[in-house]
Image (cartoon, coloured by chain):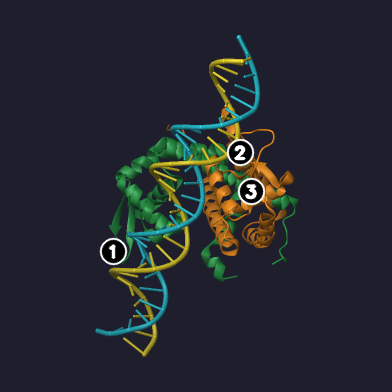
Chain colours: A green, B orange, C cyan, D yellow
Amino acid sequence: MTGARWLDEREMAAWTAYLTASHLLERRVEEQLKADAGLTHAQYEILARLSAAPDRRLRMTELARTVVVSKSGLTYQIGQLEKRGLVERATCPSDDRGVLAVLTEQGMRCLERTAPGHVTVVRELLIDLLSPDELEIMARVMRKVEAATRPSARALS
Amino acid sequence: MTGARWLDEREMAAWTAYLTASHLLERRVEEQLKADAGLTHAQYEILARLSAAPDRRLRMTELARTVVVSKSGLTYQIGQLEKRGLVERATCPSDDRGVLAVLTEQGMRCLERTAPGHVTVVRELLIDLLSPDELEIMARVMRKVEAATRPSARALS
DNA sequence: CCGAAGTAGTTCAAATTTGAACAACGACCA
DNA sequence: TGGTCGTTGTTCAAATTTGAACTACTTCGG
């Protein structure tokens, strides 16, 4: 247990900067979405992912995986979005256990109305702060993290 | 509202990679801390920040700011840590309104016991994945984000 | 075709998080 | 000194999130 290599100064600084920045960024995005559209960031992400999916629909499990939320968490959020008419549930043709979350027309309009303000914040607080190189490297880094943290990676160590 | 510049392919890829990776990473860290020490990541951060502070104590507001959590959220978590004897509240000598969160000896031991496993995960899932250059650039990027997202930055735009 | 094992989604209780409202105190100016 | 404004921390209700338990369905070997 004591054999863990400690973080040196640069590493510690990078980690704490990451923690602070990611929390602050999440806070701001959440703030903007709630103020402008009454949406949670999670809810916005659900709408956005659905809008990009074929037929604007995805299986619950697949959606939960892409948005990185628990199954029960997604059930709850889809329920909320359904109440507001932004999403519908449909039966899955190929699997009777399955449920498809479908973006409604109203949900699509809500997304189109909300996206510009959201993108503006993401630009101001992240994207536009970075040079092309920095952007590319950050993307590379995050892809590495994703590969290392995906549940499938756990079994392979 | 429609004047928002959209994200191009690289930008969008970077943003989604960031979202996915940060959520997965947070999940894993949370998982490890809960399993090994029964601590939330927020709780661990509180202990860690206190341990690095002079006299192992910080004002509630200051602590909330560094951990990036709401005031009420910190009140709750300090309550939880107090129940477990890891933290104590002390009156602030210079300001009767103030409350000092103080890391106890037991809290310090808990942190020392927990830190190695935590650091190991942070290394495996982030730090050790990066070259020195990548680490430096990520730190720089995150410092930029912090500067842009800190509440004080809002007034200056 | 049958049954075991696995998968999909929901329900449920518990924990956490937040903002608004509030009470107590400090700072500052007339 | 008195009053006003800002700050500090807590309380409270509401919303969200998670894992475990559960039901229903699919898969696959025999």
Instruction: For the C terminus of chain A, give its image quadrant.
Output: bottom right
Between the C-alphas of marks 1 and 2, the distance is: 54 Å
Quadrant in the picture for residue A75: bottom left
- Element under disc 3: strand
Q: Chain of mark 3?
A: B
Q: Position of residue A94 (x, y in %)?
A: 30, 66
Query: A148 or C24, which lies in front?
Result: C24
Query: Residue at the location (69% across, 67% down)?
Result: A1
Residue that badge 1 annotates: A93
**Residue type at the position of mark 1:** Pro
Check whether the beta carbons of the residues at disc 2 and disc 3 lie within 8 A of each other: no
Residue that badge 3 annotates: B88
Residue B157 visible: no
**Residue type at the position of mark 3:** Glu
Check whether the beta carbons of the residues at disc 1 and disc 2 lie within 8 A of each other: no
Vertical side of B4 occupied by A152: above or below: below
Q: Which mark is residue B152?
A: none
Between the C-alphas of marks 1 and 3, the distance is: 58 Å
Q: Chain of mark 2?
A: B
Q: Position of residue A106 (x, y in %)?
A: 31, 43
Q: Chain of mark 1?
A: A
Query: B138 or C16, which lies in front?
Result: C16
- Element under disc 2: helix
Query: B20 or A8, which lies in front?
Result: A8
- Element under disc 1: loop
Q: Which mark is residue B61?
A: 2
Between the C-alphas of marks 2 and 3, the distance is: 15 Å
**Residue type at the position of mark 2:** Thr
A95 on left or right of B25: left
